[in-house]
Amino acid sequence: MPTDLPAAKLPLSKLVVLTGPSGVGKGTLLARLRAHHPDLFVSISATTRSPRAGEVNGVNYYFMSVPDFEAGIAAGKFLEWAQYVGNYYGTPRLPVVERLEAGQSVMLEIEVEGAMQVKKNFPAAMLVFILPPSMEALVTRLQGRGTDDLAVVEQRLAKANQEIAVADQFDFRVINDDLDRTVAEVEALLFGEKEKV
């Protein structure tokens, strides 16, 4: 998705994108990172999917109607957006730009398609792809969540295969086989001196 943001105004080295297939543990990883680094600004995504049990509007997601989301797309209000298993997902532009311009690091936890848009539009951003230890582990995680019916789980698995196929296009790849180790590895990427691959 094209953006009207001038590249010179964005401190791109502070924009970090965390992505990977559904069920890989991005949300759990992000929660741990936020607990360790409360000053890290995490952008809240918008979606047209229905809230899951316990999810709060403006905390977990901004829950929007399809017409409102599509109006936001037309008005250029998203840094990136994508359709995923029948719903829209996107990153509201204004909060991210405001934090970056203030010199604060920003992390996006977004779908792979949206991450590819960020890679294209903001090449200095750091893109981290989270991988499952195996497809069998991903199946177990998706079925174990109990948040989707079987048809949606199957859609998510089919999409995951497509997404994992492009993982080598991202700057870093981290296998989420042990949460503590995964958190430590992502922290090393965020705060260390590792070069992009």
Image (cartoon, rainbow, N blue to C red):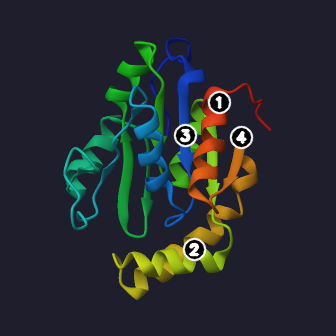
Q: How many marks?
A: 4
Q: Which residue is mark 1?
A: 123
Work out which quarter of the rendered image holds the C terminus and state it: top right
Work out how far the residue at label 3 is from the one at label 1, CA to CA, in angstroms: 11 Å
1 or 2: mark nearer the eye: 2
SS type, badge 4 = loop
Label 2 to label 4: alpha-carbon separation: 22 Å
Name the element at disc 1. loop
Left or right? Give the position of 163 relative to 66.
right
Per the image, the residue denoted by label 4 is: 171
Packing grade of label 3 (10 A; few <14, some 14-19, many >=20) is: many
At 51% from the left and 48% from the top, the residue drawn is 114
The front one of 135 and 86 is 135
How far apart are the two marked residues, 4 and 3, measured between alpha carbons? 10 Å
Whole-percent x and y of residue 92? 34, 37
Circle 2 sits on which residue? 138
Q: Amino acid at mark 2?
A: Leu
In contact (CB < 8 Å): disc 1 and disc 4:
no
The reply to whether the C-beta atoms of the residues labelled 3 and 1 are less than 8 Å apart is: no
N-terminal of the pair, mark 1 or mark 2, is 1
Q: Is residue 156 above or below residue 37?
A: below
